[in-house]
Image (cartoon, rainbow, N blue to C red):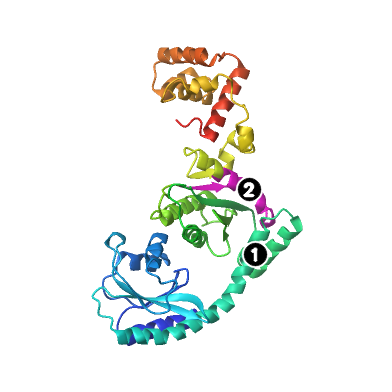
Amino acid sequence: MLGELQRLVEALAAELGRPVVLEDRRQRLIAYSQHDEPLDGVRRETILQRHTTPEVIAELRRSGIATSQVPVRIPGNRDLDLLPRVCVPLWHAEVLLGYLWFVDADATMREEDLDRAMQRGGDFALELYRENLVGELSRRREEEALRNLLLAESDARREAAATLVELGVFAPDGPVVALVAQPVRDVEAPVEPELLRLAIEQALVLTRREAGSRDALHLVRHDHGLLVVAATGRVGRPPVAAHGQTLVRALQRAVAGLPGRGRVVVGMGEPRPSLELVLESYEQARQAARLAVSLPGVGPLAEWRELGVYRALAQLSAEQLGAGLLHPGLEALLAASEDQLLARTLETYLDLAGNVGATASALQLHRTSLYHRLRRIEQVAQADLADGNERLALHLGLKLARLTGRYAP
């Protein structure tokens, strides 16, 4: 069917004497004709990445393309590198199925051209409708099976794993790892949920494509995305951490133009021996992503196995974290100076197991100055750094304070 859609695109381009691009209703590229004239940045990005960025989608939808049943002329936007263009929405049985796009920088597209595009649009809409009937069932079965993998019932997970193998979308030959992609929320600059989910999906699809056929699955949830990748270590396949880095870059790019979306995090769980056990890796990845949101120094790629003591602290609820768990002298230490110099010195000292030489080097201090600070820390916190229990309580307290945002050097 995609071959038929490509034929229709080329025929319409020849009839109108101008390039044509066909996108689905979520503005993912389906087909395009040969382009001879200079391309604007939006058209180039669409062809290279096979989708339009959420920032551009938001701009285009403000022109009413998602509700109009007649051609829409869209003015240029220099900031987005967008030339003036015409959009023909494609409807069938009162359902929007996609869009035809024509760059019209010199405003030479006449009314008769628009009429012909609308007439041919019926053929496109019918073909898209047929394609949706065939492809939608398979996609829904894949999504349903992947959701069932995240259920607690072992029988449901076992059946879901078998379904994904039966559909031919995942290879059943080794361990798997879950990655969670999550843009960091900004309550002062809310984003339309659909655009945010679209950005997450674009990043997941790109990373899944690079991971290879039958080596990855993806699912978009309400505020994050899940990517399941094979961790087989086969020759020629990149390590899982490389997929994590790809996902970070893809998500950063996808949300770059959305308001208040400058930071993203990706959490990565540990490998699990089979697909039906991926829930364990997913829960670890979710926790790792949550920690990366709270602790910017951890991300943007947070691997569960690398999080040390934070893996234990992550099991505590928000109420437990605020229930007087800090060392009694830590509050005084955190308030001792605006830049929390004493707290940073203590954390470095404890992170380095009390090694004075290594601590002085890390802080670029003379040993004498470090000894002076350590004595000052003991005075302010009313603690004895020679006491192992005191050191442990202070060290854990600092990590808890980081996790709750009370301590953010």
The local crowd at label 2, few if under 14, some if 14 to 19, many if 20 or more residues have their Cα within 10 Å, is many
Residue found 61% across the figure and 37% down from its top = 318
Where is residue 141 drawn, in percent x and y?
64, 68
Q: Secondary structure at mark 2?
A: helix
Where is residue 106 drawn, in percent x and y?
23, 75
In the image, residue 283 sits, relative to residue 5, either above or below, namely above
Residue located beneath label 2 in the image: 283
Taking the magenta stretch, the answer to whether it contains residue 279 is yes
In the image, residue 97 sits, relative to residue 307, either above or below, namely below
Residue found 56% across the figure and 56% down from its top = 222
Q: Secondary structure at mark 1?
A: helix
Q: Quadrant of residue 340?
A: top left
Where is residue 324 drawn, in percent x and y?
62, 26
Residue found 29% across the figure and 59% down from its top = 79
Does label 2 or label 1 sit earlier along the sequence?
A: 1
Of residues 216 and 115, which is closer to you in this image?
Answer: 115
Q: Amino acid at mark 1?
A: Glu
Where is residue 48 drawn, in percent x and y?
38, 66
Image disc number at residue 144? 1
| Placement of the C terminus among the 4 image quadrants | top left
Report the Cα–Cα distance between label 2 and label 1: 18 Å
In the image, residue 326 sits, relative to residue 157, either above or below, namely above
Taking the magenta stretch, the answer to whether it contains residue 35 is no
The local crowd at label 1, few if under 14, some if 14 to 19, many if 20 or more residues have their Cα within 10 Å, is some
Q: Amino acid at mark 2?
A: Glu
Region rendered in magenta: 264-289
Of residues 3 and 332, which is closer to you in this image?
Answer: 332
